[in-house]
Image: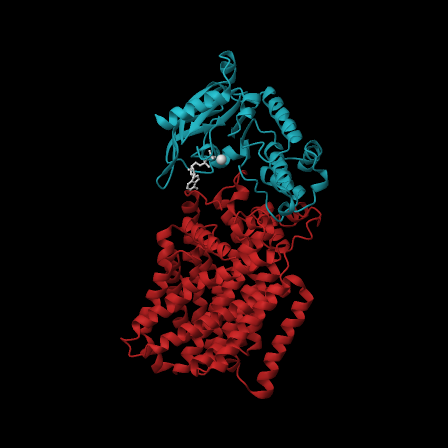
Chain colours: A cyan, B red
């Protein structure tokens, strides 16, 4: 982590806009996320969370605005950004005809990770899917595919991970494990950016949060702040969204 | 069933129109109509050169071929395979959660595909001809008859491939036996009775002389194989516990001479595990080329056999260029969105894998040259085939990037493709007919191909990749 990155924030977005035809999915969003945060991007379905993550990881080109991630301009160097961060997309899409092991090996080759299979072993144990390692991805259940995607995002130990709806396909035991992992991961000085429409998750593990509604940023703040005011995130969220709809 | 059908149609429309823009998509049949309309005016010209019966053979064979290609592409390819993946979000897949049998979904799916392509290809073609018919003094009954016979020709192709592919997925041995029997039956019939293949092609006979008996027989040829296919259909969810050894590591090492070894390794694994290597080679390469050979052998009465070989080499090149779709079919960009892989890198890697696959057409054209007694033309045929293939590939990549299936649906893209490839083909055909050895000059096509590919890298890097 360079000095510049620390001062600048790990993610810096300036007036990001993404338009699909006449739908403005992301409307003039500026964000700054510092190192060590577990940041939650919250909002109802269709509010632009996925689009925002895709913009920040160079999967989509912004219609207007700019963003830097780990000091790299996502427009100029999207591959450089993806090299450094870990990403879990909204829909688990490991390649159908590779086995779980093969997929991780493939990721290791593409990302030039030394001893990737040894690292994979740890993950097969930790997320408890050892018995599925030689099964083709197309034949895995959604939960197992999500475990695989989770492994893929963290196997190279990125300093920043962006996760779209992290817990959506996991059972409660797995959810606990994943939440613990994420909290521990930021405690070691890394940064995590998650999107979710499930508010309890945000309330439980996030430090900072932003609320998105119909592509517009309604609020940014810290969970600690809310707790001080003795306000539940969902009450706050609903009141904001309501205002957003009527105002 | 009806409701499922309607929803599937809607879904198909929605998928394609969001993929390619609804205007471009809606214009597709209009364009086919336009081509048929304008083509009709060339009819008197054709008649002067080719007897009318032959023209009918050509058009009917083209629609038979179309049925086979659509069948190979639709059934074996994208969608049914998609259902086997477990990750496709198409209705045909999600319907698994509804109280409908697999077989019912499959049937509806096939009916939908058929209706869809009939509307997209067959109906506009005949309509174009019908509109032109008063101007070229053809009675209106002819296009009406043509609508019937072309539909049947199309369905015959579809039913044939549907039948063969179901047998294939049931048992490879049974398929091989069936295939050999059909081939031997065909050859035997021809050799011992002298009945030409055209006589067996009932839609064509129906066009020559309409009779209810022929009509019923032609329908039977469509219905019986389809019915057998439906009965034989199995949903292949049984071997979900199949396990595989890690093939990425050894393959990546073996393929280290590739620019991107892991990507090449993945292409290879996809090709073999999806069954598309053998399946596609058979259904999208050998069967269409077999039919084309038959089509050209009809022409052999009008042009010298050497020229027929060169023409065949050109067409083989065009078909060989579609091998690019084999590589992209199971590999949407969404698998790479979380990895540091750019679109140009992926395109480059796919093109390298494509180059390796070209061993198939290269060997094929050499064998055909030798077998057809055209050894003297072997070198020009070989060069023509590969130059055309790489040139057509470059046009495909430039127009469609990583989603070549766009070609089949987007009018603007298809038109651009037809023009860019068509002009080059016509020039090559002219060149080859003047002197077969001039055809070697087709290597020059590598120059525009190279420029197009370079331009594609910039073009597709600048665009958001569609995620299906
Ligand atoms: N590729 C796309 N083409 C057109 N519209 C899109 C595309 N991706 C997202 N949208 C639209 O943008 C809006 C935001 O979508 P998304 O970012 O997926 O929201 P969220 O993840 O918060 O549910 C939605 O209205 C969605 O329909
Ligand atoms: Mg989303």
- Give how far across and how far down residue B364 sits, in percent: 57, 68
The percent position of residue B393, horizontal first and vertical second, equals: 47, 57
Res. B435 in view? no
Residue drawn at point x = 39 percent, y = 83 percent: B51
Describe residue B287's horizontal placement relative to residue B20 as left or right.
right
Q: Nearer the viewer, residue A230 or B282?
A: A230
Would residue B236 appear left or right of A39 to someone viewing this image?
right
Q: How many marks?
A: 0
* Residue at image location 44% in from the left, 32% down from the top: A47
**Relative side of B319 to B44, left or right:** right
Residue A81 position (above or below residue B2)? above
Residue found farthest to the left: B135
The x, y position of residue B310, in whole percent, is: 47, 73
Is residue B467 among the parts visible in the rendering?
yes
Q: Is residue A211 left or right of residue B266?
A: left
Quarter-of-image position of residue A183: top right
Q: Nearer the viewer, residue A235 or A84?
A: A235
Is B56 situated above or below B235? below
As displayed, is residue B348 above or below residue B422?
A: above
Quarter of the rendered structure image containing ligand 1: top left
Q: Residue furthest top?
A: A228
Q: Is residue B333 above or below residue A246?
A: below
Image location of residue A235, percent across then percent down: 48, 21
């Amino acid at each position: 982590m360079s000095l510049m990155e620390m001062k600048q924030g790990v993610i810096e977005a300036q007036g990001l806009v993404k338009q699909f035809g006449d739908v403005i999915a992301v409307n003039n969003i500026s964000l700054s996320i510092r190192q060590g945060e577990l940041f939650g991007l919250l909002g109802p379905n269709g509010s632009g969370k996925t689009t925002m993550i895709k913009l920040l990881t160079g999967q989509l080109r912004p219609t207007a605005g700019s963003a830097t991630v780990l000091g790299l301009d996502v427009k100029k160097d999207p591959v450089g950004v993806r090299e450094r961060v870990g990403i879990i997309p909204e829909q688990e899409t490991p390649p159908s005809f590779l086995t779980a092991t093969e997929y991780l090996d493939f990721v290791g080759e593409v990302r030039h990770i030394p001893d990737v299979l040894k690292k994979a072993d740890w993950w097969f144990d930790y997320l408890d899917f050892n018995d599925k390692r030689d099964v083709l991805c197309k034949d895995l259940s959604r939960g197992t595919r999500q475990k695989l995607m989770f492994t893929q995002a963290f196997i190279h130990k990125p300093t920043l991970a962006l996760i779209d709806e992290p817990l959506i396909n996991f059972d409660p035991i797995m959810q606990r494990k994943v939440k613990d992992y994420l909290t521990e991961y930021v405690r070691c000085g890394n940064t995590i950016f998650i999107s979710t429409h499930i508010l309890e998750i945000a309330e439980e593990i996030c430090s900072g949060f932003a609320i998105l509604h119909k592509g517009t940023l309604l609020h940014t703040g810290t969970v600690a702040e809310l707790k001080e005011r003795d306000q539940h995130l969902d009450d706050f969220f609903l009141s904001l969204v309501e205002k957003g709809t009527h105002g | 069933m009806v409701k499922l059908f309607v929803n599937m149609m809607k879904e198909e429309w929605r998928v394609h129109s969001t993929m390619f823009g609804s205007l471009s998509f809606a214009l597709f049949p209009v364009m086919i109509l336009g081509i048929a309309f304008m083509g009709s005016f060339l009819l008197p010209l054709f008649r002067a050169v080719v007897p009318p019966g032959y023209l009918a053979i050509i058009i009917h064979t083209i629609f038979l071929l179309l049925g086979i290609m659509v069948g190979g592409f639709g059934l074996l390819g994208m969608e049914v395979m998609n259902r086997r993946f477990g990750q496709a979000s198409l209705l045909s897949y999600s319907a698994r959660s509804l109280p409908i049998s697999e077989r019912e979904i499959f049937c509806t799916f096939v009916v939908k595909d058929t209706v869809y392509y009939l509307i997209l290809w067959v109906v506009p073609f005949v309509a174009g001809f019908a509109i032109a018919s008063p101007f070229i003094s053809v009675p209106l009954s002819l296009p009406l008859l043509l609508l019937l016979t072309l539909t049947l020709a199309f369905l015959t192709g579809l039913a044939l491939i549907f039948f063969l592919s179901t047998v294939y997925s049931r048992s490879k041995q049974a398929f091989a036996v069936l295939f050999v029997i059909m081939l031997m039956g065909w050859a035997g019939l021809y050799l011992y009775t002298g009945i030409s293949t055209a006589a067996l092609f009932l839609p064509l006979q129906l066009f020559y002389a309409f009779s209810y008996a022929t009509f019923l027989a032609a329908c039977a040829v469509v219905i019986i194989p389809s019915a057998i296919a439906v009965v034989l259909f199995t949903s292949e969810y049984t071997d979900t516990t199949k396990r595989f050894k890690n093939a990425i590591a050894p393959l990546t090492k073996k393929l280290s001479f590739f620019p991107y070894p892991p990507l090449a390794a993945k292409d290879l694994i996809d090709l073999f595990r999806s069954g598309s290597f053998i399946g596609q080679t058979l259904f999208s390469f050998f069967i269409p080329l077999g039919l084309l050979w038959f089509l050209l052998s009809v022409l052999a009465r009008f042009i010298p056999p050497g020229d027929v070989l060169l023409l065949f080499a050109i067409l083989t090149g065009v078909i060989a260029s579609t091998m690019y779709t084999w590589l992209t079919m199971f590999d949407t960009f969404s698998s790479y969105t979380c990895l540091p892989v750019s679109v140009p890198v992926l395109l480059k890697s796919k093109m390298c894998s494509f180059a390796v696959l070209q061993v198939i057409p290269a060997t094929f054209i050499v064998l055909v040259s030798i077998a057809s007694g055209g050894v003297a033309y072997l070198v020009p045929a070989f060069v023509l085939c590969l130059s055309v293939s790489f040139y057509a590939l470059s046009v495909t990549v430039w127009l469609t990037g990583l989603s070549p299936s766009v070609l089949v649906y987007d009018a603007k893209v298809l038109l651009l493709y037809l023009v860019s490839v068509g002009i080059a083909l016509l020039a090559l055909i002219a060149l080859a007919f003047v002197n077969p050895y001039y055809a070697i000059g087709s290597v020059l096509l590598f120059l525009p191909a190279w420029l197009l590919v370079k331009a594609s890298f910039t073009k597709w890097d600048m665009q958001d990749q569609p995620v299906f």
